[in-house]
Image (spheres, rainbow, N blue to C red):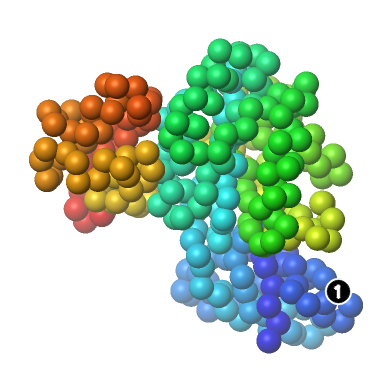
Amino acid sequence: MILATVIKSVGGLYTVKLDTPYNGENYANVRGRGSFRHDKTILLTGDRVELEPQLQGEFFCKQILPRKNSLIRPPLANLDYIFVVISCKRPMPDLQIIDKMIAIAEHNKIEPVIIISKADLDTEFAEKAERIYKNSGFDVIVTSSYEKEGVDKVLDYLKEITKQNSPICAFAGASGAGKSTLINTIFPTLCLKTGELSQKIERGKNTTRHTELFPLGELLGEEYNGYLADTPGFSLLDFERFDFFTLEELFSTFREFEISLGKCKYTKCSHTKEDGCDIVARVSSGEIAKSRHESYKALYEILKKKPSWKK
């Protein structure tokens, strides 16, 4: 049995890293079986696959092993950590988009790590965002790639989580948020394109055209395991079009709500505005960030209106 991990997908051709070298090679280009097209099976970066050797050293993907999880945006499978990069300025961050990504990660049992970038451009916002997400129960790292502040903390975090285990770690963020610049600063040998920011519309050019995994053993040293992903920037997470999770599952995607479970006055509390709602009370007291509750309410309204046939 030949096992491998998909590390790159471009136009139906997949690059995989073999678990065990085959004919002296650690990597191979692979195509899916014809039945994959018939079944509309799509290989994702991060997929664990079983290969079947063909003539002239080529391989077909025989099957996809069971996934831990999969995401639509970024298009990745078997994720363990998502480093969500929030820019303090240029572009101005939309915390509801950030919270949508976090909620999707939480639903899929992926650990979000919040990276606040460009902190030197707006120290007040950087401190506010750090407070919001730390109080919500997330690990937060504040960075300035140009001044290289905090970058060593991201590197230390990666080393800590990859020394014993073999996780897949994705960097995700809005275009222009600085994720590729941050990765370049940590790993100069990757030489990822970063692109120039459009001053006219304050949005970054999306220079990451596909999702690709980089073996951390090759970047950090043989004692480290797992993969680092660079992904296309995300600007829209459409809960009306895509089925990320249901209204009934929404509560569990906000981890700071957990201790309020069963403490509301009404059994069928929506946790949006009811008298006697423990969540609303904790927002009023400042224990839960207002921005996080606003994100929850926005998602609640979208999922509540979603036709039952889409749920």
Q: In which quadrant of the rendered image does the C terminus lie?
A: bottom left
Q: How far across and down, in percent of the image, does residue 158 sit?
A: 70, 47
Mark 1 residue element: strand
Q: How far across and down, in percent of the image, does residue 189 sit?
A: 86, 44
Q: How far across and down, in percent of the image, does residue 24 sit?
A: 89, 77
Kind of residue indicated by mark 1: Glu
Q: 141 above or below 268?
A: above
Identify the residue at image location x=13%, y=31%: 276
Identify the residue at image location x=81%, y=60%: 223
Identify the residue at image location x=66%, y=22%: 118
Q: 241 above or below 70?
A: above
The answer to whether residue 188 is left or right of residue 126 is: right
The answer to whether residue 311 is left or right of residue 124 is: left
Query: As rendered, which of 86 and 232 lies closer to the eye?
Result: 86
Judge the density around disc 1: few (<14), some (14-19), many (≥20) Cα neighbours within 10 Å: few
Query: As rendered, which of 18 and 209 lies closer to the eye?
Result: 18
The answer to whether residue 213 is left or right of residue 33 is: right
Q: In which quadrant of the rendered image does the N terminus lie?
A: bottom right
Dividing the picture into quadrants, the one containing residue 48 is: bottom right
Is residue 22 visible in the rendered structure shown here?
yes
Is residue 215 visible in the rendered structure shown here?
no
Q: How far across and down, in percent of the image, does residue 140 sit?
A: 57, 34
Q: 228 above or below 182?
A: below
The answer to whether residue 132 is left or right of residue 32 is: left
The residue under label 1 is 25
Query: As rendered, which of 265 and 45 lies closer to the eye?
Result: 265
The image shows a total of numbered marks equal to 1
